[in-house]
Image (cartoon, grey):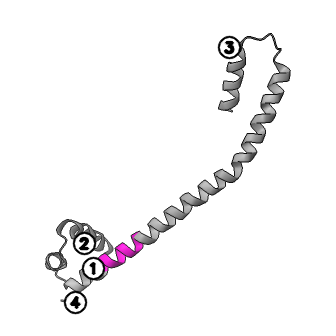
Amino acid sequence: MAKRLTPKQRIQIQADYTELQDYFKVGRLYGVYASTIKRIVDKYLETQKRADNKKEQHTQDILDFMNSRKNVLFDITEKVEERLKTLIPVTTDIQRLMTAYGLLILI
């Protein structure tokens, strides 16, 4: 039963195994041993686990970076608020003040 499988067939084997959940049935479809199917599926699962771990690590790195920049953002916001207070006269109505603050948040 020695048969070379193309990369396209290997991908299809993974999909077929997901559907059938039986190494022997999938092996019969492709004319290969069940152990070959198991090896292909296991390699796919291992690769998928590594990709998931890398994705989780990347997400954590982004969250850590955003958390480290949070204080900088707060400092900038406080400085802009102080500057707005000096630029907007005390007699300005609340609507204008809130509009200015809303623009600050958008920036």
Do the residues bearing badges 4 and 2 touch, measured as CB atoms within 8 Å?
no
Q: Mark 4 vs mark 3: which is more N-terminal?
A: 4
**Which residue occupies the foreground of this view, 76 or 25?**
76
User: Quick one: SS at disc 1?
Assistant: loop
What distance separates the C-alpha of mark 4 from that of mark 1? 10 Å
Residue type pointed to by label 1:
Leu
- Residue flagged by tag 4: what amino acid is it? Ala
Q: Which mark is residue 2?
A: 4
Quadrant including the N terminus: bottom left
Q: Which mark is residue 13?
A: 2
Q: CA distance from mark 1 to mark 3?
A: 70 Å
Start-end of magenta stretch: 40-48
Image check: 104 left or right of 91?
A: left
- Main SS category, magenta section: helix
Please report whichever mark, 3 or 2, sits nearer to the chain's N-terminal start. 2
Q: Are marks 1 and 2 in contact (CB under 8 Å)?
A: yes
